[in-house]
Image: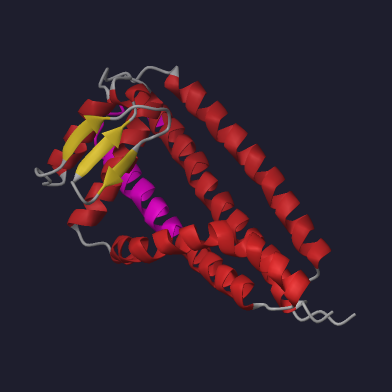
Amino acid sequence: MTLLFVSYNSALLLMIVIALVSFIVQFRFKSKFKQYSEMPLLSGLSGKDVAERMLKDNGIYDVRVISVEGQLTDHYNPEDKTVNLSPDVYHSRSIAAAAVAAHECGHAVQHARAYSWLSFRSSMVPVVNVASTLTQWTLMIGIMLLFFTHNPLVLAVGVGALALVTLFSFITLPVEFDASQRALAWLNNNYTIMQTREEHAQAKDALWWAAMTYVVAALSALATLVYYASFLFNRRN
């Protein structure tokens, strides 16, 4: 059998392997976050304090630091210029809280400095939102139509939409890695925040595992794209 893309079985195996890796990375990240959340910051600063200091040190005065409900809900919102920290980060005086707060402020710095990858990612959001909605119904319906009517059009639309979502996942990677680098550089130069090399190393470890969750998410999106594309490109076999 001639394969124009990859076989269904190979694509399915790829999805399973990446899903397993994703589970391991997510488990490791949560374990690390819990570990470092229980380690008090020697400076005694809260996540809110760390965020406000980093913004101030970078000359950013129009961004608010606020608390939002939920766990691991920390994010920067460029539309209303807010650093949103979960209660576990906002109030906590731990190494994990400081690392996460600094990372989210890294995104605020990117926004203030017009970081190109962040700007590109933000410009894609409206299109990706539409693409995400399309994938919810076009993929499965497209496969059904392909098998019963041999019409690949709906599935092709779904695969195209999924390709945009996958691209967005990979564009997110440099944005997240750069935010962590900015956070760690700032923490390394501010001994009043993290007073020992050990604290800095632990913060770096926490952010590294957080970054890995974005890596496996991008790979998972790619594996899903390959899986659905295998139906489209092997439809004549």
Total numbered labels: 0
Q: Is residue 64 above or below residue 235?
A: above
Q: Is residue 234 above or below residue 136?
A: below
Indicate the position of residue 142 as horizontal and vertical percent values. 65, 68
Q: Is residue 146 above or below residue 62?
A: below
Q: Which residue range is magenta in the image?
A: 172-197
Q: Is residue 130 or residue 75 the one in the foreground?
A: 130
Q: Is residue 175 magenta?
A: yes
Indicate the position of residue 144 as horizontal and vertical percent values. 71, 65
Give me the residue at 15% from left, 42% from top.
63
Q: Is residue 108 magenta?
A: no
Q: Quadrant of the C terminus?
A: bottom right
Q: Quadrant of residue 87?
A: top left
Give me the residue at 60% from left, 72% from top.
154
Report if residue 199 is visible in the image.
yes
Magenta stretch: dominant secondary structure: helix
Q: Is residue 41 left or right of residue 113?
A: right
Rendered image coloring scheme: secondary structure
Q: Quadrant of residue 232?
A: bottom right
Indicate the position of residue 29 as horizontal and vertical percent values. 54, 34
Q: Quadrant of the N terminus?
A: bottom right
Give me the residue at 44% from left, 40% from top.
207
